[in-house]
Amino acid sequence: MRSRVSSMAAGSSVEWLKSVKAVVLDMCGVLYDSAEGGGQAIAGSAEAVRRLMDSGVTVRFCTNETQNTRERFLQKLRVMGFDISVSHVFSPAPALIHILKERGLRPHLLVHDDLLPEFDGVDMSSPNCVVIGDAADNFSYQNLNEAFRVLIGLEKPLLFSLGQGRYYKETDGLKLDVGVFMKALEYACDVQAEVVGKPSAEFFQTVLSDMKLQPHEVVMIGDDLLNDVGGAQRCGMKGLQVRTGKYRPSDEQHPSVRADAYVDDLAAAVNAILTDH
Amino acid sequence: MRSRVSSMAAGSSVEWLKSVKAVVLDMCGVLYDSAEGGGQAIAGSAEAVRRLMDSGVTVRFCTNETQNTRERFLQKLRVMGFDISVSHVFSPAPALIHILKERGLRPHLLVHDDLLPEFDGVDMSSPNCVVIGDAADNFSYQNLNEAFRVLIGLEKPLLFSLGQGRYYKETDGLKLDVGVFMKALEYACDVQAEVVGKPSAEFFQTVLSDMKLQPHEVVMIGDDLLNDVGGAQRCGMKGLQVRTGKYRPSDEQHPSVRADAYVDDLAAAVNAILTDH
């Protein structure tokens, strides 16, 4: 199986994989391919997660999923064969709600309907900031105009974006992600959004703190070169890109971000990590 | 009426206005305020245009309007009291079609339904570029995804944007303009769009060539500080901002673009130009 792991430079080593103490896993594109209303596990990934957890390696999950509450999201994954605890999943919405409370902010939301329960109890009267998530079909011209009017009406426009991804893959094709609409509203109002979720360093730090580990002891495995691999590397973690999900061959020639290794899929990565374990 | 004309620095002169040989007028926000399906003339502007044309000053019209063919657009304006010839109106769609033909390009269109007749006879099979205009309600998540998939599927994504405005004002409020969706697709595909229309220098040059005048002999009057005033100034023309349409008081404190004068409305500008004429 080791032949399925290739590193950037021919002949360079992936020996370091054997000594990582913890693995942070992106979910969509690594564990499963999403589809409207569901999705399907990537071959071998459910078993790979089980083997990794059983081996004693610390495992956490880090997702920019904002189309569901974490509870509903994990229910979906359970059907696909993944048994993951809510406390091991880090997603943008809870992190944002913490920020809103701390700073006394009242959001105007442009998010997916299924994420709304996360905001139960959050004061949304006279909004003084705008929050966008992966709203999918809710990204209509009308809803974007509404969010824009709230923003431009504020003395100092304040925009939070739950992630800054460009696009993701569903079984019926590539779909635009929240980052695209963040850029749209940034340009409309001449502001810079505060990104909550990957690749924000704060977000990765929360995961590291939870594990009580140093960044160099941890590898992030993701299908997104910039948000998973690049974000983790900027925090001192190793970054592995899998060739599943939104991976594109041109990622391996990216001018500024290079994964520490490129791996066919999660099963191959786990094989490499567990060799000699 | 001269008291209604104010220039940037207190006491500075607007004497130069009297010596301009030609006036280029932005249309929406200067001549009229738009509304879905129509709009209404800004008080005094129809008479101001008539006086200007009768005075012997050369007048041209320069619009980023892409929700209509020029013919239909001028019909709308006729109802509001403006009698303008098609040959005096410069808009992005005809300029773009010229570029497409010259470069053998076949567009995938994301534009307003009412603009489609401009593209009669344009080959749109196997698109090798994407064109976006002010598509308004056609900027749905589904249509944006479709345009994105065409772009990302091209070996070298090629995106044309009919203007790069941030927003405009309709009678029922501010609305997001094409530039916002240009930025969205630019980010999604990591490309830079080619802008056709204001503030592209090429576009202003076409108007200057048509008038056979030097830039310093011409003043552009618009409500958009960046696209009208800034664009014209970069071509060596004078730029006047009217305090109608999308004008906002903060425009007068913009860090990098300053109009040569700020004027309450078109009537006041024409009064200043025609003094001593």
Image (tube, coloured by chain):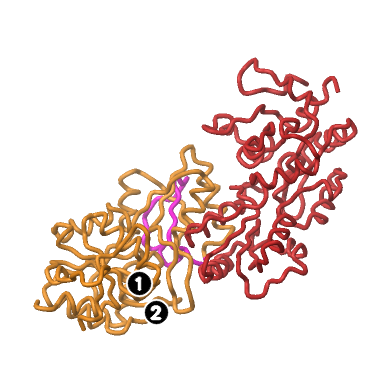
Chain colours: A red, B orange
Vertical comparison of A148 with B191: above or below:
below
Name which residue lies at 35% across and 73% down: B29
Vertical comparison of A62 with A191: above or below:
above
Is the Cβ of the residue at disc 2 closer than 8 Å to that at disc 1?
yes
Horizontal side of A79 relative to A172 (left or right) equals right
As helix, strand or loop, the secondary structure at mark 1 comes to loop
Q: Position of residue A199 (x, y in %)?
A: 64, 44
Q: Residue furthest front?
A: B10
Magenta-colored stretch includes residue B129? yes
Name which residue lies at 43% across and 73% down: B169
As helix, strand or loop, the secondary structure at mark 2 comes to strand
Q: Residue furthest left?
A: B276
Q: Which residue is mark 1?
A: B28
Q: Which residue is mark 2?
A: B39
Q: Which chain hosts label 2?
A: B
Q: Position of residue B61 (x, y in %)?
A: 25, 67
Q: Earlier in the sequence, mark 2 or mark 1?
A: 1
B42 and A81: which one is in front?
B42
Q: Is residue B38 visible?
A: yes
Q: Residues within 10 Å of mark 1 (few under 14, many from 20)?
A: many
Q: Is residue B83 visible?
A: no
Q: Which chain hosts label 1?
A: B
Q: Position of residue B124 (x, y in %)?
A: 43, 51
